[in-house]
Amino acid sequence: MDRSRRFAAADYAAPGWYLVTAVTWSRRRILGTLTEAGFSPSKVGQCVQSAIDAIPHYRPWVSCLASCIMPDHVHLIVGWERVPENRLGTIFAIVGTVKSDVTRITRRTAAVYPGQAVWQRSFDVRFLRHQARLNTAVEYVNTNVERALVSRRLAPGTIARPEGRA
């Protein structure tokens, strides 16, 4: 039986900030590659960036505070203060639009095969209720590529330690 990881009592239309992570189908690395210079997006990754950039165009009340595209997933921090009346303003509507736009455009431009899935069915969402959690999430998203590059440089069996610890 497929169970949702969502909280039944949660209001995913509530004003505030949300940290979203969407993962590609089977964690395929179709969004780009990590190089020593950083992240290099593929055509699909470029479509993802365009869809993220378009969020405020279709939903002017939504702000995108931070985003990070990785080879097999995307992190996004979006939020709003108030949803206009008669408008769909849930995190599901926003992320669903981004995912469907990317899928439609990549299929039309032959960046993926027709019928090929781009995304896993669901996505992870965290409501960032406190300023400290928002600050931590923004730092996490903004440094994701850098952390991935550092972890790739570590020798097998090496454990990364925070600065100042032996």
Image (spheres, rainbow, N blue to C red):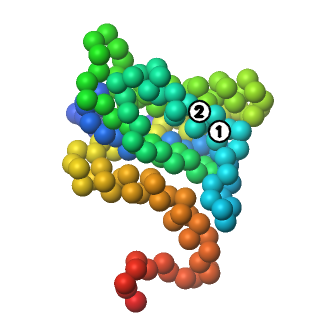
Is 144 or 30 nearer to us in this picture? 144
Q: Is residue 126 above or below residue 87?
A: below
Q: CA distance from mark 2 to mark 1?
A: 6 Å
Q: Could you say whether the residue bearing mark 2 is in a helix, strand or loop?
A: helix
Q: Quadrant of the N terminus?
A: top left
Residue 124 seen from this side: no
Q: Is residue 109 above or below residue 140?
A: above
Q: Position of residue 141 (x, y in %)?
A: 44, 53
Q: Could you say whether the residue bearing mark 1 is in a helix, strand or loop?
A: helix
Q: Position of residue 89 (x, y in %)?
A: 34, 22
Is 126 or 60 nearer to us in this picture? 60
Q: Which residue position holds label 1?
A: 46
Q: Residue furthest bottom?
A: 166
* Left or right, 5 with reference to 49: left
Q: Position of residue 117 (x, y in %)?
A: 65, 34
| Residue drawn at point x = 41 percent, y = 37 percent | 64
Q: Quadrant of the C terminus?
A: bottom left
Q: Which amino acid, by three-letter code, is at mark 1?
A: Gln
Q: Is residue 26 above or below residue 115?
A: below
Callout 2 touching callout 1 (CB < 8 Å): yes
Is 29 or 115 nearer to us in this picture? 29
Q: Which residue position holds label 2?
A: 50
How packed is label 2: few (under 14 Cα within 10 Å), some, or many (20 or more)? some
* Left or right, 142 with reference to 100: left
Q: Which amino acid, by three-letter code, is at mark 2?
A: Ser
